[in-house]
Image: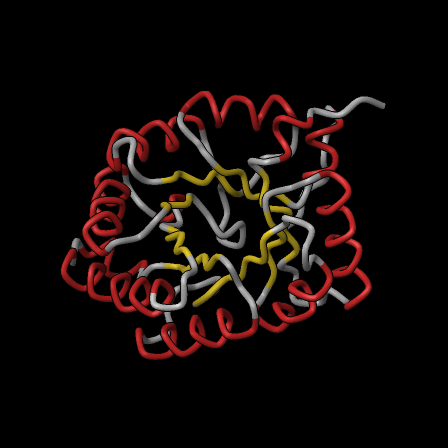
Amino acid sequence: MSTDASLASFIDHTLLKPEASREQILTVCREAVEYSFKSVCVNPLWVSTVRTAVKDTGVLTCSVIGFPLGASTTEVKVVEARGAVADGADEIDMVIDIAAARAGERDVLVQDIRAVADAVHENGAILKVIIETALLSDEQKVLACEAAVEAGADFVKTSTGFNGGGATVEDIALMRRTVGPGLGVKASGGVRSLEDARAMIGAGATRIGASSGVAIVKGEQGAAGY
């Protein structure tokens, strides 16, 4: 079956289930190399495993921080991010302080994101900021995206996939308008088909987070998961 190779470079091939086994992680790594996905995205526990498995292949190693609730203290997020980068993560996807976003506390958001951004950037990695769109109003989504820009993030990202909802074309378009052309926008949560992925990219996404990466590039329908 033919695949959409041009789309593969947008995809962070993701396995974040807490019960994921080492063999499942290694399978995702093999798929990422085979299909030339942008990265493999895993929980911090598996960063060194992924880094070793994809070494010298061009596939990046990505990890999540403060995941999936965003309710850790900033200090804990910083320690977690530094540890993941030290283990070999090229990219960090952090969850914001969702309560602060809902309360309109922009300064709290900026401080939280900036501390992690500084820790990540000092070691040459990049930071994606998960705003968890399913829990925010449009006004709160804009606030969170503006805070991410001010704090020096490299991307904004829709969702964890753990709190209901997921990426929508409308949210991607709103996020792109808010951050402008300079930041990446990652669509994550519920992107399971080639049509889904193309719609997100058309709305302004520059990265796709999906557990269904293989199905997407094959033009098939992926199963629900994260």
Q: Is residue 180 left or right of residue 41?
A: left
The residue sitting at the right extreme is 1
Query: At 55% across and 22% down in the image, what residue appears?
Result: 198
x, y (%) of residue 40?
A: 63, 53
Number of callouts in the render?
0
Query: At 66% across and 55% down in the image, what residue appears?
Result: 15
**Is residue 120 shown above or below 174?**
below
x, y (%) of residue 38?
A: 59, 43
**Colour setting:** secondary structure
Query: At 82% across and 64% down in the image, what residue appears?
Result: 23
Q: Is residue 163 left or right of residue 213?
A: left
Image quadrant occupied by the N terminus:
top right
x, y (%) of residue 195?
A: 61, 21
Instruction: Tell me which corner region of the image, top left, top right, bottom left or bottom right, holds residue 179.
Output: top left
Decide which of 6, 103 is in the foreground and name it: 6
Decide which of 138, 208 is in the foreground and name it: 208
**Is residue 121 shown above or below 212?**
below
Q: Is residue 118 left or right of residue 134?
A: left
**Is residue 2 shown above or below 78?**
above
**Is residue 170 shown above or below 155?**
above
Q: Is residue 131 left or right of residue 62?
A: left
Instruction: Tell me which corner region of the image, top left, top right, bottom left or bottom right, holds residue 133.
Output: top left
Query: At 34% across and 70% down in the image, what residue appears?
Result: 119
x, y (%) of residue 193?
A: 65, 28
